[in-house]
Image (cartoon, rainbow, N blue to C red):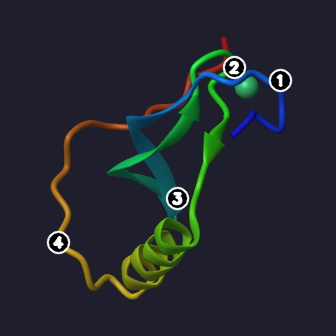
């Protein structure tokens, strides 16, 4: 398999965190996907896509337990 972006061939399973926006918050979802080690492009198989869609639907319906780990702040313009 070659990277569709940089055409490199160093693609390996890696732990990543997806950022899913929910209202004005961001939920981090840890998973393993194939990642191009040259440019960082991520590749999702069908099962992973389906899993992410399910999680997005559940998050929109507030059906998943969440733990707050930080705050998101906006720079106040001066
Ligand atoms: Zn690449």
- Could you tell me how far apart the alpha carbons at marks 3 and 2 are, in whole angstroms? 24 Å
Which one is earlier in the sequence, the residue at label 2 or at label 1? 1
Asked if the residues shown at circle 2 and circle 1 are in contact, with their CB atoms under 8 angstroms apart, the answer is yes
At horizontal 58% and vertical 56% (from top left) the residue drawn is: 44
Mark 4, residue position: 65
Judging depth in this view, the residue of 72 and 57 nearest the camera is 57
Say if 54 sits above or below 26 in the image: below
Numbered disc 1: secondary structure: loop
Q: Quadrant of ligand 1?
A: top right
Mark 2, residue position: 39
Mark 3, residue position: 21
Mark 1, residue position: 6
Judging depth in this view, the residue of 61 and 16 nearest the camera is 16
Numbered disc 2: secondary structure: loop
- Find the residue positioned furthest to the top: 78
At horizontal 40% and vertical 42% (from top left) the residue drawn is: 17
Asked if the residues shown at circle 4 and circle 2 are in contact, with their CB atoms under 8 angstroms apart, the answer is no
**Image coords of residue 36 (percent x, y):** 62, 28
Circle 1 crowding by C-alpha within 10 Å: few under 14, some 14–19, many from 20: few
**Image coords of residue 60 (percent x, y):** 45, 81
Which one is earlier in the sequence, the residue at label 3 or at label 1? 1
**Image coords of residue 11 (percent x, y):** 58, 30
- Could you tell me how far apart the alpha carbons at marks 3 and 1 are, in whole angstroms? 28 Å
- Could you tell me how far apart the alpha carbons at marks 3 and 4 are, in whole angstroms? 15 Å
Tell me: 70 left or right of 51: left
Say if 49 sits above or below 20 in the image: below
Numbered disc 3: secondary structure: strand
């Amino acid at each position: 398999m070659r990277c569709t972006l940089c055409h490199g061939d160093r693609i390996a399973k890696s732990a990543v965190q997806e950022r899913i926006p929910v209202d004005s918050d961001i939920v981090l979802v840890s998973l393993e996907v194939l990642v191009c080690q040259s440019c960082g492009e991520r590749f999702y198989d069908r099962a992973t896509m389906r899993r992410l869609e399910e999680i997005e639907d559940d998050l929109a319906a507030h059906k998943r337990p969440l733990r707050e780990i930080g705050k998101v702040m906006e720079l106040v313009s001066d």
